[in-house]
């Protein structure tokens, strides 16, 4: 009986760790996708991705480095937006989704330019994540204010 309970608890921990790792991989992949939408990824965008994952989403810095490197190597094998948004809609609350949209705006703005493809991507993501245009616009304004400092 005790072994059964230990197995159940160990399985729950491994499922939670898998979910955390999948969450980091998806966030990283989506952020790389946003940064690469204009055809290039600048160092400023990479730094912003790292800082966002570590500071906003409280991810382990060592794991962020590993997953970011893996995502950069796979940037040409992009997944559909549905792949990202279905996971995010199932696992993130509305506040975390808003933080993600704001982080994406910060990443896109970090190179000093907003390309039409980048803003289009974030508008589509906002819709797929059920975030209103007003909230997305407010996230963009907050990101602009942060980038101007």
Image (cartoon, rainbow, N blue to C red):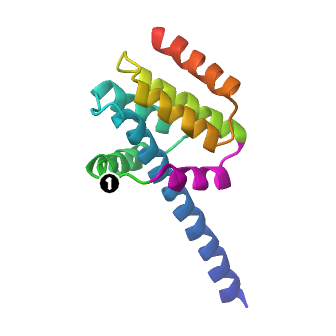
Residue 149, visible in the rendered structure: no
Position of residue 52 measured from the top left corner of the image (x, y, whole percent): 48, 33
Residue 11 is a magenta residue: no
Nearer to us in this view, 149 or 13: 149
Q: Which residue lies at the image location 69% right of the left edge and 41% below the top edge? A: 130
Furthest toward the bottom, the residue is: 1
63 displayed left or right of 58: left
Horizontal and vertical percent position of residue 18: 52, 64
Residue interval drawn in magenta = 80-93
Q: Could you tell whether 43 is left or right of 131 in the image?
A: left
Q: Quadrant of residue 129?
A: top right
- Label the magenta part by its dominant secondary structure: helix
Identity of the residue drawn at 67% across and 27% down: 133
Question: Which one is in front, 121 or 8?
Answer: 121
Asked if 45 appears above or below 19 in the picture, the reply is above
User: Which quarter of the rendering shows the N terminus?
Assistant: bottom right
**On the image, numbered disc 1 is attached to which residue?**
77
């Amino acid at each position: 009986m005790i072994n059964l309970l230990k197995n159940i608890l160990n399985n729950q921990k491994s499922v939670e760790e898998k979910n955390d790792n999948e969450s980091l991989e998806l966030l990283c992949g989506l952020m790389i996708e946003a940064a690469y939408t204009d055809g290039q990824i600048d160092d400023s965008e990479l730094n912003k991705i790292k800082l966002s994952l570590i500071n906003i989403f409280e991810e382990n810095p060592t794991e962020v480095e590993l997953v970011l490197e893996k995502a950069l190597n796979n940037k040409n094998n992009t997944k559909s937006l549905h792949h990202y948004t279905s996971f995010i809609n199932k696992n993130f609350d509305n506040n975390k989704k808003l933080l993600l949209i704001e982080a994406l705006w910060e990443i896109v703005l970090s190179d000093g330019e907003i390309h039409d493809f980048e803003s289009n991507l974030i508008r589509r993501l906002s819709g797929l994540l059920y975030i209103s245009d007003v909230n997305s616009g407010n996230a963009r304004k907050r990101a602009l204010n942060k980038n101007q400092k």
